[in-house]
Amino acid sequence: MAALAGWLTRWQPIAIHGAMLAGARPEAVAGALGSSPEEAYRRWREWALRQRNFIIGGKLGITEEAYEEVAGRFALAGIKLSA
């Protein structure tokens, strides 16, 4: 079970990113994760900051536009965005 929990935790930010880009509300994403919107944001942001600087095959992990779109959706929902 610990391995499954570790795997799920590792891939959650990708699921958060995809759901938010698809138009899901932060509250719905958090509910699916069993956490708060703030925790969903924290998990996503830690991952997203690394992905913005990750280049493989000449492509970024995520674009600045995708990062800003998801961060903006969290902000519109009133999620406190830390620096």
Image: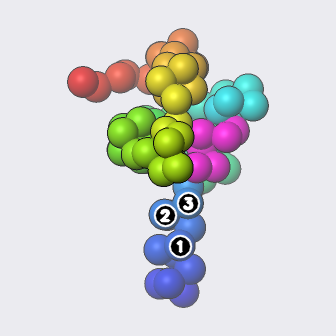
Residue 27 in sight here: no
Residue 70 image offset from top left, x and y in percent: 55, 26
Residue range corresponding to the magenta coloring: 13-19
Q: Which disc, if any, is residue 7?
A: 1
> Left or right of 53: which side holds 67?
right
Residue 54 image offset from top left, x and y in percent: 40, 45
Question: From mark 1 to mark 2, how far is it between C-alphas?
Answer: 5 Å
Name the residue that disc number 3 marks.
Answer: 11
- For the N terminus, give its image quadrant: bottom right
CB-based contact (under 8 Å), mark 1 and mark 2: yes
> Left or right of 66: which side holds 6?
left
Looking at the rendered structure, the kind of residue marked 1 is Trp
Name the residue that disc number 2 marks.
Answer: 10
Is 2 drawn above or below residue 11 in the view shown?
below
* Magenta: main secondary structure: helix
Toward the left, the furthest residue is 83
Residue at x 60%, y 43% (from the top left corner): 16
Residue at x 48%, y 50% (from the top left corner): 56
- Disc 2 is placed on an element classified as helix
Looking at the rendered structure, the kind of residue marked 3 is Trp
- Disc 3 is placed on an element classified as helix
Is 44 drawn above or below residue 81 in the view shown?
below
CB-based contact (under 8 Å), mark 3 and mark 1: yes
* Crowd around label 1: few <14 · some 14–19 · many ≥20 (10 Å): few
